[in-house]
Image (cartoon, helix red, strand yellow):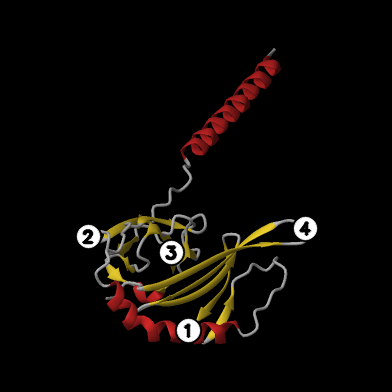
Amino acid sequence: MKLLLIFFTLMCVTDTEAGVKHHNLDLLACSDTDEEVMWGSDGEEQFYADFKQKKLENVLPPFADPYDFPGGYEWAETNIGICKYNLDGWKKDFKDLPVPQDAPQNSIYTSDDVQLGSENTLICHFTRFFPPHVTVRWTKNGVDVSDKSTLSQFYPNKDNTYNQFSHLSFTPQEGDIYTCTVEHKALDSPDTRTWEVNVELPSVGPSVFCGVGLFVGLLGVDTGTFFLVKGNRYN
């Protein structure tokens, strides 16, 4: 079973001295193929454990107050180990229970306005899906470029479904076609979204006609002035 079979989400509310309530989120997940530990607050991710780099990643924006989480990665690694150890028992206990399914809603868009030749990022967003396991494939002009993409952590929604993002860095060239294909248990077939580089260049027609009209007008003024001067001389 490749679905996330153990998925703990702990939400709590903290009350500061100023009376402001904050919603904190701790997320721990493991399966045969996936593992994730993430901490957040008020709907924003703060830290997650990067098990490939073996460190805790701080994803707070630069303008946020500096905040550290000593021992966070060690805690995550220990508890993922416990989760993996208990996985076989959980699979036996819950093998006959139906798993609720919600198909992802998918979209593809760029992070910035498109300018030919300027590096940009394509974002494939799949949202409101359950269970939290999605396979994503990218192509450029029919060629698989999935190895150049990245995949975000799972982000929980209030209705117990999940969001996730895949990013692909690219340099727009006229006519290039990109696709993002999402596979999920709740989908009858893979869902493919297409994005094509089609930048409309500013039209030069009005300015050309305006320039020609201005030139003809000035030429008419010069011609009229010439004949007016000539006429005055003869008069």
Q: Amino acid at mark 2?
A: Ser
Q: Residue 32: tell me if it is visible.
A: no
Residue 51 tag number:
1
Q: Earlier in the sequence, mark 3 or mark 4?
A: 4
Residue 164 tag number:
3
Q: Earlier in the sequence, mark 1 or mark 4?
A: 4
Question: Disc 3 and disc 4: Cα gap in Å?
Answer: 34 Å
Task: Tell me if residue 234 comes above or below residue 214 in the rendering.
Answer: above
Question: Disc 2 and disc 1: Cα gap in Å?
Answer: 31 Å
Return the x and y of residue 8 as percentages of the image width and height: 46, 71
The kind of secondary structure element at disc 2 is loop
Return the x and y of residue 125 as percentages of the image width and height: 42, 59
219 horizontally vs 161: left or right? right
Task: Tell me if residue 197 comes above or below residue 134 in the rendering.
Answer: above
State the residue at coordinates (31%, 63%). 182
The kind of secondary structure element at disc 4 is loop
Question: Disc 3 and disc 1: Cα gap in Å?
Answer: 18 Å
Disc 4 target residue:
18
Return the x and y of residue 62 as percentages of the image width and height: 67, 69
